[in-house]
Amino acid sequence: MYCHVNISSHRAASDDLIDFRGFLYMFPQQEDNVRRQKAFIDTILRFPALGYFVSSLTWTIYPRECPYRQKCVDHTKMWEAWKLLIRVERLDIYSFAGDWRDFVHFPAPGFDEGNFGPSAIIPQVVFPGATSIRIGGLMPYPYFRACVSRPSIVTSLEMENLQGLLQPKDSCLLNFHYVLRSGIDDDFWTNHTKYKETEDGHGIPVLRHGGPMRGHLQPLVGKFVQLEHLKISTAGREVSRDVRWSETREKKRYSEMADFIKPLAPKLVTFVFEQGVGLEPLQIWQVESHNNTSTLSQSRRPMDDYFFEFILPALLEGTWSQLKKFSIQGVCGNVRYETTPLLRDMNFTPEAPEFLESVMHQLRSVISNSVEFTFERETQRVFHMASLNVYRSRY
């Protein structure tokens, strides 16, 4: 009965990952899934022995957009139930959540929430036997660490556009008074980009800006000793004048991905790297202003520059002795049609075909001729960009 548990809506019939965030949550399927998830959690907690029979789990984390909290999944109970699923081998979790309010544990009725709560949930390690992990969407950094807890046994890892929540410290209490007691200014939540991102002595992310996860891979470098299948999918920076992105942060993020990939090459059978533009259209207030007396030029998207600076050298240095499938998608794609009207003073020039041919030739030279090789400029995937960061003044 509970061998293969699938209570999700992030998979389509084609097996592609679809982000239905927001506009499909209130559909009957999503409401029904929330009810099914609550029933599953309650059953496992009532009869813990049933957790022993679950070998695969596919689960969508939904936003708390329901009118009453009691109709939402209680994440504290969810993690308690997940701890009992000790034999799960195949794990597929994707989050449609929108912000911290979709994760925090609210105090019991009558508790003075205004002074002391809510507090973030600090999950314990779960799924110790998971060998195939697919994880993505917006979530707290500790959620990722709890689910990817034993890298040494993992043979397949897919990270689907992982987005991290803004946090002043790891698994912090989310209330005004705690922020003050922590020595962090009271404007942290609205002006957090002035604070430098930090890590602890083990490389675990501490203070983090919102947006694509950074720092979650560094503690795991070299630890996936049995990994055969790797997919990294990420939202990226489309135009240089988008104030939501930090050049420094993005370079660190791509450098981290490159460091993660390098030691894995000799054992990988399949490798997929995919980047794309966020689903949300760029707004005029998010575009850094420019003196209109001159024209700026952007030959390629910043995300493509980062790929060529960090990811490509890591791929070319690799020894791909076991590889059968090698796929690069979303590199040197065109700037979206709906973006260009906001940047009339910029001249976008597409990448020369001979340059892309040279890149493909370089990649081909480090892999066997028998490898199924794909290099595509565009991706058909949907990417969500959750960050509301502002790194530079528009004016």
Image (spheres, rainbow, N blue to C red):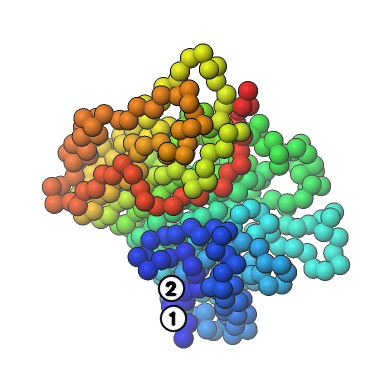
Res. 252 visible in picture: no
Label 1 packing within 10 angstroms: few (<14), some (14-19), many (20+): some
Residue 347 in view: yes
Above or below residue 184? Residue 19 is below
Which residue is at 35% across, 65% downward? 14
- Kindly indicate the quadrant of the structure image that contains residue 40: bottom right
- Decide which of tag 2 and tag 1 comes sooner along the chain: 1
Look at the numbered discs 2 and 1 and tell me whether their residues touch, using CB distance below 8 Å: yes
In this picture, residue 314 sits left or right of residue 115: left
Residue 227, quarter of the rendered image? bottom left
Q: Secondary structure at mark 1?
A: loop
The x, y position of residue 167, in whole percent, is: 65, 46
Question: Which residue is at 73% across, 52% downward?
Answer: 173
Q: Amino acid at mark 1?
A: Cys
Residue at the spot x=28%, y=44% of the render? 376
- Mark 1 sits on what residue? 3
**What is the tally of numbered marks visible in this picture?**
2
Residue placed at 53% from the left, 17% from the top?
Answer: 292
- Give the quarter of the figure containing the C terminus: top right
Closest to the observer: 145 or 62? Answer: 62
In the image shown, does 202 or 193 lie closer to the viewer?
A: 193
Q: Nearer the viewer, residue 10 or 174?
A: 10
Residue 80 lies, in percent from the top left, at 61, 71
Residue topped by disc 2: 56
Which SS class for mark 2?
strand
Q: Residue furthest left?
A: 369
Q: Which mark is residue 358?
A: none
